Image (cartoon, grey):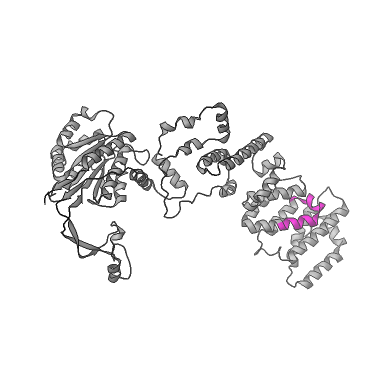
C-alpha cells in the first residue's frame, strides 16, 4: 500500500508507461517476480518522494529512473535473488534511502554504480559488506564523487588489500574530518602532519636497511608501535591482520633455534628512527645502548616463552623451560668421565627384544618388526636386536652414569621464570653425560616427602630435563631415602656413578636422619663409596662455603663443592669439573 501522495500521483500519471514496461518484461521473462519488484520499488521510492529540496518535474524524472533501473536489476536476477546475492537488496536499499539527495541528482548513475560497488565488494569480503555499508552511511552532505571515494577507502579497510595503493592516494586529498570518520579517530591537521612525517621515516628505513633486516626491523617496529597500540575494536584488528603475518609462523614440527640469545642489533636497533636522527645530531648514545652490558646477552625463560607463543607454538611453561635450558646447554657441553677397561667387548647378536618408545629410533630392526606384524605399533610390535659381548683385542671405554638431585625449595629460583644457573649447570652435565652414553637418574626434591624421580637410570633426555626444570617451592629436606635405596644393593662390578647435587645452603639436610633413624652422614658416605665415580655439590651461596662446618665435613667426606651465582661461575665450574673428572681410569677385570 503506497502512503506517499506524491508517489501515488506520479504512478497514476505514468500508469500506462509503467504497465507497458512491466508487460514487456513479463513477455521476455515468464519467471519475472512482479510482486517482489513492486514491493521493493515502493520501499525505496516513498522516502525519495518525500524529499523536500526538489521540484515536481525533477522528482517525477527521478522516480521513473529509479523504476527503470531497479527493473533492470530484477530482470538480470541481481535483485530478487537472495540465494546468490544475499546482501545486495538490503544494502542497496539502505544506501539509496540514506543518500536520496544524490539519487535525485543522477538516479541512473547512482543506482547502477552503487549496485555494482556492492556486488564487487561482496565478491571480495562476503558478509562483511554489511559492515562496509554501515560505515558508508555515517557520511552526510557529500557529493557522489566523494561518496564513492570514501567507499573505496572503506573497502580497503574492510580487507580488500589490492585497493591499498589507490585508497592511499584518495586519503591524501580527503578532508581531515572525513579521514577521522573513516579511521574512527580524531584526525587533525597536526596528526596528519605527524603521520606524513612517519611515512617519510618509514620510506627511509626501508631503503636504508634493505640489506640489513635485523637492524631495520627494530626501528620499523618502533615506528609502527604507537599505531598498533591504538587498536580499539575487532573491525580494526581485521584490517591489521595483513600486518600480523607471523602469528602462525611456528605451526608444525619445526622449532626455531637460536632464540635464547639476544643479538646486539636487537637492542641497538629497537629505537624510533626519529630518536636515531636526534642522537646523530647530539652525539649521545641511547639509554638502551648504555644498558646492554647490564642486561646480558641472553633472554630470561619467560621472555623466550613469549617469543615462542607469539609465533604460534602451542607449548606449556614446562616444555618452554626444557627447550630453553637445552639450547643454552648444548653450546657448553663438556667431556664426561669414562672408565677404561683392559679389553674391549665386541658385540654379539643374541636375539630380539621389544623396542621401547624411550629408546633411540635407530635401534629398531625394521625387517624383524614387519615379520612379527605387518602393522607397526611403537612399543608393541617393534623389536630391537639384543647383543651380548665377546672379548675383543682393543681397550674399551665404559661411560660413568650420573645420579642427579635437584633442589626446588622456596629458596631456589624458579627456572621457568628466571634463568637459574644451577639448573643450567645441571643441564650441561646431564646432556654431556647422555652424549657420552651414560644413563641418568634425576630426582627433584623440596620438603619432606616432596620429590619426583625418573624410573631409575634412563637415557631419555626430555624426562631428565623435565626433572631439572621442575619446581615445588616449599621447604627443604634432602630425600636421603633415595640415596640410601639407590646404592644399598649396588655391587662393585656395576657401572660407576657420579652423584651430582644442585642446591643451596639447604644441601646440608643430606646429613639429617632418615625415616629409619639412620645417620645421613653415614648414608652419604656409603653412597659415595659404592658409586665409585665421586660426588659434587653445585650450590648457590652468597658466602664462602668453607664458613659452614657441615660443608667442610662434606668436603672431607669426598664431595667436590662449587658455588655458582652467575654465568662466569658456571663457565669456571664446567672447566673445573671437566679437568678433574675427565681422566681415563684403568680398572682391572
Q: Which x, y percent locates residue 257?
A: 41, 47
Secondary structure mostly seen in the magenta stretch = helix
In this view, 321 is above or below 378: above
In screen coordinates, is 528 left or right of 285?
left
Q: Which x, y percent locates residue 205?
A: 58, 40
Closer-to-camera residue (552/446)? 552
Give the image quarter of residue 291: top left
Residue bounds of the magenta highlight? 98-116
Tell me which residue sits at (27%, 68%) in the image. Answer: 368
Closer-to-camera residue (142/584)? 584
Tell me which residue sits at (47%, 32%) in the image. Answer: 289
Q: Which x, y percent locates residue 468?
A: 30, 44
In screen coordinates, is 485 left or right of 110?
left
Tell me which residue sits at (51%, 30%) in the image. Answer: 286
Q: Which x, y percent locates residue 532?
A: 15, 44
In screen coordinates, is 560 left or right of 278?
left
Report the quarter where the N terminus lies.
bottom right
The reply to whether residue 476 is in sight is no
The reply to whether residue 497 is in sight is yes
Closer-to-camera residue (337/473)? 337
Give the image quarter of residue 181: top right
User: Is residue 128 magenta-colored?
Assistant: no
All told, the count of numbered labels is 0
In this view, 470 is above or below 365: above
User: Is residue 104 magenta-colored?
Assistant: yes
In this view, 359 is above or below 259: below
Q: Which residue extends farthest front?
A: 393
In screen coordinates, is 201 left or right of 579?
right
Amino acid at each position: 500500500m503506497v502512503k506517499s501522495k506524491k508517489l501515488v500521483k506520479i504512478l497514476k500519471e505514468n500508469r500506462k508507461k509503467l504497465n507497458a514496461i512491466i508487460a514487456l518484461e513479463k513477455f521476455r521473462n515468464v519467471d519475472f517476480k512482479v510482486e517482489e519488484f513492486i514491493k521493493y520499488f515502493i520501499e525505496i521510492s516513498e522516502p525519495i518522494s518525500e524529499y523536500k529540496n526538489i521540484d515536481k518535474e525533477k522528482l517525477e524524472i527521478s522516480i521513473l529512473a529509479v523504476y527503470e533501473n531497479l527493473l533492470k536489476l530484477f530482470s538480470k536476477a541481481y535483485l530478487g535473488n537472495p540465494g546468490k546475492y544475499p546482501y545486495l537488496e538490503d544494502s542497496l536499499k539502505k544506501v539509496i534511502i540514506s543518500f536520496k539527495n544524490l539519487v535525485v541528482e543522477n538516479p541512473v548513475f547512482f543506482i547502477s554504480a552503487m549496485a555494482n560497488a556492492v556486488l564487487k565488494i561482496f565478491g571480495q569480503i562476503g558478509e562483511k559488506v554489511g559492515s562496509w555499508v554501515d560505515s558508508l552511511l555515517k557520511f552526510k552532505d557529500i557529493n557522489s564523487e566523494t561518496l564513492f571515494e570514501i567507499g573505496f577507502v572503506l573497502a580497503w579497510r574492510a580487507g580488500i588489500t589490492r585497493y591499498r595503493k589507490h585508497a592511499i592516494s584518495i586519503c591524501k586529498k580527503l578532508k581531515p574530518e572525513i579521514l577521522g570518520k573513516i579511521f574512527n579517530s580524531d584526525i587533525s591537521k597536526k596528526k596528519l602532519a605527524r603521520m606524513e612525517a612517519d611515512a617519510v621515516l618509514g620510506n627511509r628505513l626501508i631503503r636504508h636497511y634493505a640489506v640489513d633486516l635485523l637492524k631495520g626491523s627494530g626501528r620499523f617496529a618502533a615506528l609502527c608501535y604507537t599505531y598498533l597500540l591504538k587498536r580499539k575494536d575487532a573491525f580494526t584488528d581485521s584490517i591489521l591482520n595483513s600486518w600480523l603475518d607471523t602469528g602462525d609462523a611456528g605451526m608444525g614440527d619445526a622449532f626455531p633455534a637460536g632464540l635464547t640469545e639476544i643479538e646486539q642489533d636487537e637492542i641497538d636497533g629497537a629505537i624510533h628512527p626519529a630518536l636515531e636522527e636526534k642522537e646523530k645530531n647530539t652525539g649521545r648514545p641511547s639509554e638502551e645502548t648504555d644498558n646492554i652490558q647490564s642486561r646480558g646477552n641472553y633472554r630470561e625463560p619467560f621472555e623466550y616463552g613469549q617469543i615462542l607463543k607469539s609465533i604460534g607454538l602451542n607449548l606449556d611453561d614446562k616444555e618452554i623451560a626444557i627447550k630453553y635450558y637445552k639450547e643454552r646447554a648444548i653450546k657448553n657441553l663438556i667431556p664426561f668421565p669414562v672408565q677404561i677397561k683392559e679389553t674391549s667387548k665386541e658385540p654379539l647378536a643374541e636375539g630380539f627384544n621389544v623396542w621401547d618408545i624411550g629408546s633411540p629410533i635407530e635401534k629398531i630392526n625394521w625387517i624383524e618388526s614387519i615379520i612379527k606384524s605387518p602393522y607397526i605399533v611403537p612399543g608393541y610390535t617393534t623389536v630391537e636386536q639384543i647383543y651380548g659381548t665377546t672379548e675383543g683385542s682393543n681397550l674399551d671405554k665404559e661411560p660413568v652414569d650420573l645420579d642427579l638431585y635437584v633442589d626446588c625449595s622456596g629458596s631456589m629460583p624458579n627456572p621457568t621464570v628466571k634463568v637459574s644457573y644451577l639448573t643450567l649447570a645441571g643441564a650441561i652435565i646431564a646432556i654431556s653425560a647422555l652424549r657420552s652414553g651414560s644413563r641418568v637418574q634425576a630426582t627433584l626434591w623440596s620438603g619432606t616427602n616432596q620429590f619426583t624421580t625418573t624410573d631409575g637410570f634412563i637415557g631419555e633426555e626430555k624426562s631428565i630435563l623435565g626433572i631439572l626444570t621442575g619446581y615445588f617451592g616449599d621447604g627443604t629436606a634432602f630425600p636421603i631415602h633415595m640415596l640410601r635405596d639407590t646404592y644399598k644393593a649396588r655391587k662393585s662390578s656395576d657401572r660407576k656413578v657420579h652423584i651430582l647435587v644442585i642446591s643451596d645452603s639447604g644441601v646440608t639436610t643430606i646429613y639429617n636422619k632418615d625415616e629409619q633413624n639412620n645417620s645421613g652422614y653415614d648414608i652419604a658416605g656409603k653412597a659415595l663409596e659404592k658409586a665409585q665415580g665421586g660426588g659434587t655439590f653445585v650450590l648457590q651461596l652468597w658466602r664462602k662455603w668453607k664458613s659452614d662446618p657441615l660443608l667442610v665435613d662434606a668436603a672431607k667426606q669426598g664431595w667436590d663443592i662449587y658455588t655458582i651465582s652467575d654465568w662466569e661461575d658456571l663457565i669456571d665450574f664446567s672447566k673445573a669439573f671437566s679437568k678433574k673428572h675427565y681422566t681415563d681410569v684403568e680398572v682391572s677385570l
